[in-house]
Image (spheres, rainbow, N blue to C red):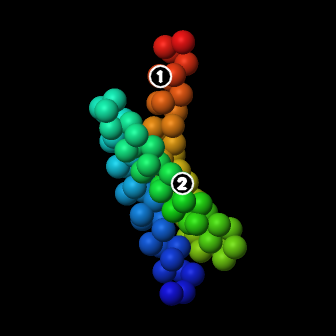
């Protein structure tokens, strides 16, 4: 596969997996699953951001990897808030 197709696929997957990770925050029982989705989303978004920095594929202002990273960070921030609030 060429880097351009990997860039597009990793951007779309990072957003989709990040949305799944964010949706898992709705129920406290799904937090562990949300963290697993977050790790996978961080991997895809890191690949996307790295390929964008190396080959400069972005037509717009930013790549989809940044949006995926924001969505993937929601379960981590949620878990930190739960832990610090109940101490």
Q: Position of residue 6 (x, y in %)?
A: 51, 77
Q: Nearer the viewer, residue 26 or 59?
A: 26
What residue sits right under mark 2 in the picture? 42
Q: Is residue 25 above or below residue 64?
A: above
- Within 10 Å of the Cα at label 2, are there few (<14), some (14-19), or many (20+) other Cα atoms? many
| Dot 1 alpha-carbon crowd within 10 angstroms: few under 14, some 14 to 19, many 20 or more | few
Residue 22 visible to the viewer? no
Asked whether the viewer can see residue 3, the reply is yes
Residue pushed farthest top? 87
Which residue does the image show at 62% across and 71% down from the upper left?
A: 51
Give the structural element (helix, strand or loop) at label 2: helix
Query: Of helix, strand and loop, which one carries label 1?
Result: helix
- Per the model, the C-alpha gap separating discs 1 and 2 is 21 Å
Instruction: Determine the residue positioned at 53% across, 73% down.
Output: 7
Q: Which mark is residue 82?
A: 1
Residue 9 lies, with reference to residue 3, above or below; the image says: above
- Please indicate whether residue 19 sits to the left or right of residue 53 in the image: left
User: Which quadrant is home to the C terminus?
Assistant: top right
């Amino acid at each position: 596969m060429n880097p351009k197709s990997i860039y597009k696929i990793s951007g779309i997957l990072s957003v989709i997996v990040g949305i799944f990770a964010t949706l898992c925050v709705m129920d406290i029982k799904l937090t562990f699953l949300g963290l697993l989705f977050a790790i996978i989303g961080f991997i895809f978004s890191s690949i996307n951001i790295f390929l964008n920095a190396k080959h400069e594929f972005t037509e717009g202002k930013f790549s989809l990897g940044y949006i995926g990273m924001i969505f993937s960070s929601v379960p981590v921030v949620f878990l930190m808030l739960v832990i610090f609030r109940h101490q």
